[in-house]
Image (cartoon, grey):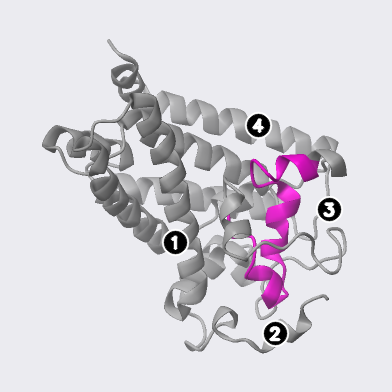
Amino acid sequence: MNLSDWVMQHEVSLRLGFFLGIFGLMAVWEILAPRRALTVSKSLRWTSNLGLVVLNSLILRLLFPVLATGMAVLAAANGWGLFNQVAVPGWLAVVASVVVLDFIIWLQHVMVHAIPLLWRLHRVHHADLDYDVTTGARFHPIEIILSMLIKFTAILVLGPPVLAVVAFEVILNATSMFNHGNVRLPVSLDRGLRWLVVTPDMHRVHHSVAEDETNSNFGFSLPWWDRLFGTYRDQPRAGHTDMTIGISSFRDTRHCSGLPGMLLLPFVGSITGYAINRREWTAKEEP
């Protein structure tokens, strides 16, 4: 049995094991070295955020006979996609596929900020009044479905090896929990790490109520795309301990911390232009 076959056979166990391991590590780290004081009941937020994770997992299993890894197997069996047509070394196909898939997720993230209708879905993620490991998995079910369809399309076009898709899913899940962690890193370590991976201090800027800060640092795993495309922001104006997390127009726990309110949040209010499509906030940029 080769490595790809073994990974495919044990995919569920691998992904669950990494999820539980990283989640447990981050949860303990948040207790031992928290970056910020929490403002909302942790039990309320964790029950709602993790309840959303369970709901999303059930919905995906019900809607799709195969998920991302299964789609990669299907693409390979039918010769679909770039890497199923072009002969390249296996290691190169794996590395290139992980990097390209990460870029596609970055583009998707920019898209859900740029299109007002999609922002209504994505604001469930941003409306969390605190910022910790559970925020990294807090997404509306419709956005999760949309994300899966985008992954399917990317896999059909790219034709990545099965090993690359499993690695990408594990890395994305792990880094999302890491960079949403309410944890403190030494400044020098953070400075070095954020050239290789998105750190908690780097991504926390993206969860600021300030619109120009919200529309920066879109990366989940690799930090390079924000630097390359001009959306990188080093630090929040108010500092990490004093910045306000969330969305300025949603500050009540009913919509922000309770599961029923989170599910209804995309349908609250009228559709209007969103900050990423406006330029007046550029005057607020620091010199």
- In which image quadrant can residue 162 be found? top left
Classify residue 215 as left or right of residue 237.
left
- Separation of disc 2 and disc 1 at Cα? 23 Å
Q: Tell me the SS state at disc 2.
A: helix
Q: Name the foreground residue: 256 vs 23.
A: 23
Q: Name the foreground residue: 79 vs 150.
A: 79
Tell which circle, 2 or 1, labels the residue nearer the N-terminal end: 1
Asked whether the residues under the numbered discs 2 and 3 touch, taking CB atoms below 8 Å apart as contact, a structural biologist would say no
Q: On the image, numbered disc 3 is attached to which residue?
A: 36
User: Badge 1: how crowded within 10 Å, few (<14), some, or many (20+)?
Assistant: some
- Residue 24 - label: 4
Q: Which residues are magenta?
A: 190-219
Tell which circle, 4 or 1, labels the residue nearer the N-terminal end: 4
- Separation of disc 4 and disc 1 at Cα? 28 Å
User: Badge 4: how crowded within 10 Å, few (<14), some, or many (20+)?
Assistant: few
Q: Tell me the SS state at disc 4.
A: helix
- Residue 108 - label: 1
Asked whether the residues under the numbered discs 3 and 1 touch, taking CB atoms below 8 Å apart as contact, a structural biologist would say no
Which residue shows up at 29% across the image and 45% down it? 158
Q: How many marks?
A: 4
- Separation of disc 3 and disc 1 at Cα? 29 Å
Q: Label 4 is placed on what type of residue?
A: Gly
Q: On the image, numbered disc 2 is attached to which residue?
A: 281
Residue 186 on image: x %, y %: 86, 40
Q: Is residue 205 above or below residue 115?
A: above
Mark nearest the camera among 4 and 2 is: 2
Q: Name the foreground residue: 208 vs 221.
A: 221
Q: Label 1 is placed on what type of residue?
A: Gln
Classify residue 125 as left or right of residue 283.
left
Classify residue 252 as left or right of residue 240.
left
- Separation of disc 3 and disc 4 at Cα? 19 Å
